[in-house]
């Protein structure tokens, strides 16, 4: 069942036809303006609706579809080929290109060795701002720790100097005490036991 053409006046009236009829009757839109607008729309949509463009797009889609169908048909054999290792298979390379292959293999090994670090770098790119803020905070903390360490080192050096001075003074102090004890003998202390025995007599 074909849909009715809204622009055909002979077809049953619909909302678009009635609205267009009112615009034409009121003089807001003329038939010439409608024709110009239809031509402009055809030009704008030519790449979408023109048969030659549609045929090209249809052909490209059909060839891609055929390729995908072939891949799906060979899916099992392709999977087996991918799973099968290619070790110990000889690749026919002319002798002239052997030195280039050696260089290529060195580059491949280097690339594979560095691949994980490159991937990690790429993964960290979205977190770069956060990591930068963390690094700035860590540097500020390190500056504080360096300052405290310097203060502690200065205090240790002062303490060491004081200890040296004390260690030089200790023999003098001991010598003075010895001389003092030699000149004035210590006072005899009596114990409570002796005092009590003296009172008992």
Image (tube, grey):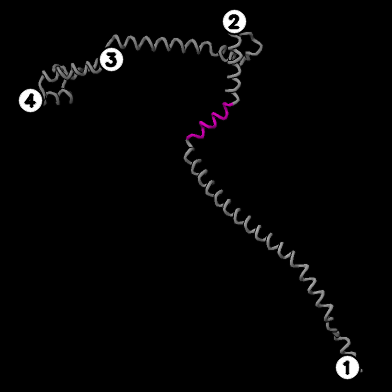
Magenta part of the chain:
114-125
3 and 2 marks in contact (CB < 8 Å): no
On the rendered structure, is 67 left or right of 14? right
Residue 123, percent from left and from top: 51, 32
**Residue carrying label 4:** 27
Q: Quadrant of residue 24?
A: top left
Kindly report the distance in space between the C-alpha atoms of the residues bearing marks 4 and 1: 147 Å
| Residue name at image x 65 percent, y 13 percent | 87
Q: In terms of sequence position, does the residue under pointer 4 or pointer 1 come before the other?
A: 4
**Residue carrying label 1:** 199
Residue 139 or 124: which is nearer the viewer? Answer: 139
**Residue carrying label 3:** 47
Residue 50, percent from left and from top: 27, 12
**Residue carrying label 2:** 94
Of circles 4 and 2, the one toward us is 2
Few, some or many residues within 10 Å of mark 1 (<14, 14–19, 20+) = few
Q: In terms of sequence position, does the residue under pointer 2 or pointer 1 come before the other?
A: 2
Q: In terms of sequence position, does the residue under pointer 4 or pointer 3 come before the other?
A: 4
Q: In terms of sequence position, does the residue under pointer 3 or pointer 2 come before the other?
A: 3
1 and 3 marks in contact (CB < 8 Å): no
């Amino acid at each position: 069942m074909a849909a009715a053409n809204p622009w055909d006046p002979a077809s049953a009236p619909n909302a678009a036809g009635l609205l267009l009829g009112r615009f034409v009757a009121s003089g807001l839109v003329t038939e010439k303006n409608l024709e110009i607008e239809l031509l402009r729309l055809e030009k704008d949509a030519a790449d979408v609706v023109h048969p030659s463009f549609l045929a090209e797009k249809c052909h490209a889609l059909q060839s891609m579809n055929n390729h995908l169908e072939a891949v799906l048909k060979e899916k099992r054999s392709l999977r087996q080929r991918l799973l099968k290792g290619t070790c110990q298979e000889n690749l026919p390379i002319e002798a002239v290109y052997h030195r280039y292959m050696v260089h290529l293999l060195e580059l491949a090994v280097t690339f594979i060795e560095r691949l994980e670090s490159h991937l990690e770098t790429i993964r960290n790119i979205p977190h770069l701002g956060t990591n930068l803020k963390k690094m700035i905070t860590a540097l500020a903390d390190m500056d504080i720790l360096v300052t405290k360490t310097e203060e502690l080192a200065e205090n240790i050096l002062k303490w060491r100097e004081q200890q040296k001075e004390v260690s030089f003074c200790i023999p003098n102090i001991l010598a003075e005490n010895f001389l003092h004890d030699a000149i004035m003998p210590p006072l005899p202390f009596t114990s409570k036991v002796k005092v009590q025995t003296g009172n008992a007599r």
